[in-house]
Image: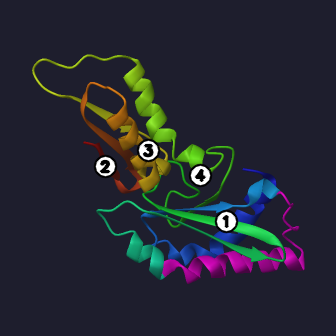
Amino acid sequence: MTAVQQAYLRTLLPRVQDLGPTLKNIAITIDDGYQHPPWPALGSAQGKRLVRHIAANLRSHVDELVALSLPPKTFSRQWTFEDSGLRVGMLAVRGRPISGSLPKGIDIRFSGSFPTNVPAANALLANAIDRKIEKRYTSYPAGPLWLLAYSDSHWVLDEASIGNARDLLREKPNPFGAVWTFVPRPHEQAGELVQVFP
């Protein structure tokens, strides 16, 4: 995270901290386009307005996110808005990863160098499974071989990510009788377990 992102996050968090209990199972990522074009200085009038608009925009989506986040379906929701010519992207995903901005409260972060974009993020699970397939494990004679793809990235729970993994498993010969993915939420002593295949 860049110094500008850290400064914006420190200023934004107090404005949305009260949403933590409502969005407790949701991770929010802010996509600033890697500061191209550069965001205004936080102390400027434009920077202060941008923080207010990010907070207000997130609040305007709370009811929708809560409705979409109810189990058992996985979900992600993306949207964008503009402020003085700056495009701001928002991504909400049900399931909280190990490393968040705060151990408690709202889980909000800026996009960084990983994952670089949504298609790359949605390929993480399929790529991990493909590496296991390439190891050429043999089936057990006494029963099916199961694979548990463990990750600290909430991206593996996205519907597109799971869909990519299912397509791979249907198309590529493999020894697995079942494949699951798991993302822990250690601060809540819980986690998300999703059956990927069959």
Q: Amino acid at mark 4?
A: Val
Q: Do residues under tags 2 and 3 come within 8 Å of each other at their CB atoms?
A: no
Which label number is shown at residue 193?
2
Rendered location of residue 166, percent (x, y): 36, 42
- Residue that carries the numbered disc 3 in the rendered image: 164
**Image spot of residue 60 (x, y percent):** 57, 83
Residue that mark 1 sits on: 89
Assess disc 3: are there few (<14), some (14-19) or many (≥20) residues with their C-alpha within 10 Å of its C-alpha: some
- Secondary structure state at the residue bearing disc 2: strand
First in sequence, mark 2 or 4: give its number. Answer: 4
User: Label 4, on which residue?
Assistant: 118
Q: Quadrant of the C terminus?
A: top left
Q: CA distance from mark 2 to mark 3?
A: 17 Å
Magenta stretch, residue numbers: 36-62
Tell me which amino acid carries mark 1.
Answer: Gly
Name the kind of residue labelled 2 in the image: Leu
Q: Residues within 10 Å of mark 2 (few under 14, many from 20)?
A: some
